[in-house]
Amino acid sequence: MLSIEKSIITKTYNNLAKDVLRSARFGFIALLGVSLPAQALSLEEQRTRYEKAIAAIERNDMATFSTLKSGLNGYPLYPYLDYREFMRELSSAKEQEVEAFVGRYDELPFTNTVRARYLNVLASRGKWSELLAFQTTVPRGESHQCQYYYAHSQAGDKALALSGAKSLYLSGSSVDRACDKLFEDLQDKGKLNNALVLDRMLLAFDNRNKTLLKYLEKQLTGNAAASGQQIIALYDKPQGVAEFAKKSKVTPFNQRLTRLSFERLARINAKDAVAQFTRVVDGQHYKKNERQEMADFLASRLMSTDDDTLAKWRDKWLKQSTNPSLLERRIRVSLVKGDWKNVERWLNVLPEKEAKKLKWRYWHARIELEKGNKAQAEKLFADMIGERNFYSVAAAMHLDKPIDIPYQTTSLNIESIKPFRAALDRVGELLVLDKVVAAKREWQYLLRRADLEQKAMLAAFASESKWYHLSVQATIAGKLWGHLEYRFPVAHRWWFEFFSKEREVPLTTLLALSRQESAFYTNAVSPVGARGLMQLMPATAKETSQKLGFRYLGKSTLSDPGINIRLGSGYLRMLLDRFDENRILAFAAYNAGPHRVSRWLDKSDGNLDAIAFIEAIPFNETRGYVQNVLMYDIYYRKLLGKQIQFLHESEQSRRY
């Protein structure tokens, strides 16, 4: 149990954060040499008034809203009040009014929303000529494209409308209902024919969308109905693919259907697919490159096979492959077994361009080391060191050389970002008001308008302002890979230092893992539902909180830095305990789950050293994750003036 009450810590931190953000905004104004105008309301009073105005318009109290808004002309977030008010009147607005509003606020991200919503207004009214006058190019978004092409149909441009309709129709997924009128128009003109329906069925087959397949089959007429039934039959029973390939006429359509059916069989029963392969490719007369592509697909399903016959078939075709990702996986199959002879064999099959990458140069050096050619290995390792790269650092480890990390610094030149003063003021205010999502949207919109030099200055400004995630985003947008202080901010330091001591986990490790997980975006939510700075799954957070004796109040609290770091650091500590303080295994488990890591260890059975085990991780995401967190730990050590260390002695000496 922690000795400091969470409520006290949270209040202290939040007050500190607001002070930092407030000072950042005034700091920018001071740097510009601008004097604040005399105003009746203080900045705090303006914020309060702004929030009251938002509350008023949300409860439809327009009289109160107008009164409050009238006193906020100089407030940075005033445009958002204008936006709220304008959106209420959008349904009755004229095109000129919308264009004027968008033009007035063209540097704000909400203008995209205004344009999109206005398209919906025009479409709902059937104002097709007005829609085309307002939207002169193909819009983004499926529903708006449907409206756009239907408008062209109504305006008489049938060719463009039909072309657009076909491109939208040919999808392996369901299409937005806004396209219904467009597709009806296509059908009325006799253009929604059997051939088009069959083409879409193949797309649905490829997308494994059985519901759409059955829906489309019902639309077929005449002789085409038999083709539709054949597609469904092969989808349900792809075991019949060789027979279909041999008896069917060789046509582009039948070749596509055969290939899709064969790939489906490979997913379901790879052994059966191997048995049918020759009859399939001969039956539809596939070209040499097409045969190789089909063999590559099947080989990808056989990487973990224990059947010698299937493995021989796989390797026979892989010898002729030029697919780097497949050959890379094949190298790992040999690596897991500690079979260095075959590792070398498959390295030599890699395309020349791929073989020159630092990763494979490292493994060529390792092979020389395994063969006893120490001098040659050391020469190859020496040619690799001095780069910001996992394999470069691993090479330095083999040579027992200091780790050299190239590093760039940039001094903030406030003049270069003067044009963005208003946007930066808005970002600062949004952050103070805890409107993190809106602040991020503003920042991304700003970065799209900035040139390379300005991106670097924006990264510097965000760093000085303690806008951690935004600093990272600027370095990514500007590809500022050498600017470590901006790429790797020491974010939420109070929390990380507190729980570093509490969990006995180095500060640099917690920072590195959080940087990899969320880039310090407190509201981050992954596609699978992981949340917050350290990307905790709600179930993991609940289980961890129970073990820590902490009262967990649900997934919404995981956006709170203090709660997230408390639970994330606690979970990492449990993983380190489980895996004997081994960070490689703990990081892999944090990403992929501890049970998978245990299975990987069972499979490698002590054949591997630390670097080989990392390389042999079968999941691309987890492999990159472990490499990144180890590297980020090094970067943070450099930034914080700590001794740089790659692997701990126990991690380096262990057999995996």
Image: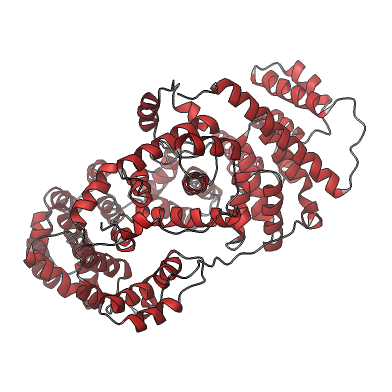
Q: Quadrant of residue 67?
A: top right
Colour scheme in the image?
secondary structure
Name the quarter where the N terminus is drawn: top left
Residue extending farthest right: 38
- Horizontal and vertical percent position of residue 419: 79, 52
Residue at x 55%, y 21% (from the top left corner): 5
Q: Nearer the viewer, residue 408 or 319?
A: 408
341 w.r.t. 260: above or below = below
Q: How many marks overall?
A: 0
- Horizontal and vertical percent position of residue 369: 30, 76
Image position of 145 (left or right of 378): right
Name the quarter where the C terminus is drawn: bottom left
- Horizontal and vertical percent position of residue 194: 27, 53
Image position of 3 (left or right of 372): right
Q: Quadrant of residue 555?
A: top left
Residue at x 63%, y 54% (from the top left corner): 486
Q: Nearer the viewer, residue 323 or 343?
A: 343
Q: Nearer the viewer, residue 146 or 642?
A: 642
- Horizontal and vertical percent position of residue 410: 70, 61
Residue at x 64%, y 29% (from the top left corner): 14
Residue 254 visible within the image: no
Residue at x 13%, y 60% (from the top left corner): 305
Image position of 82 (left or right of 379): right
Residue 303 visible within the image: yes
Image position of 72 (left or right of 503): right
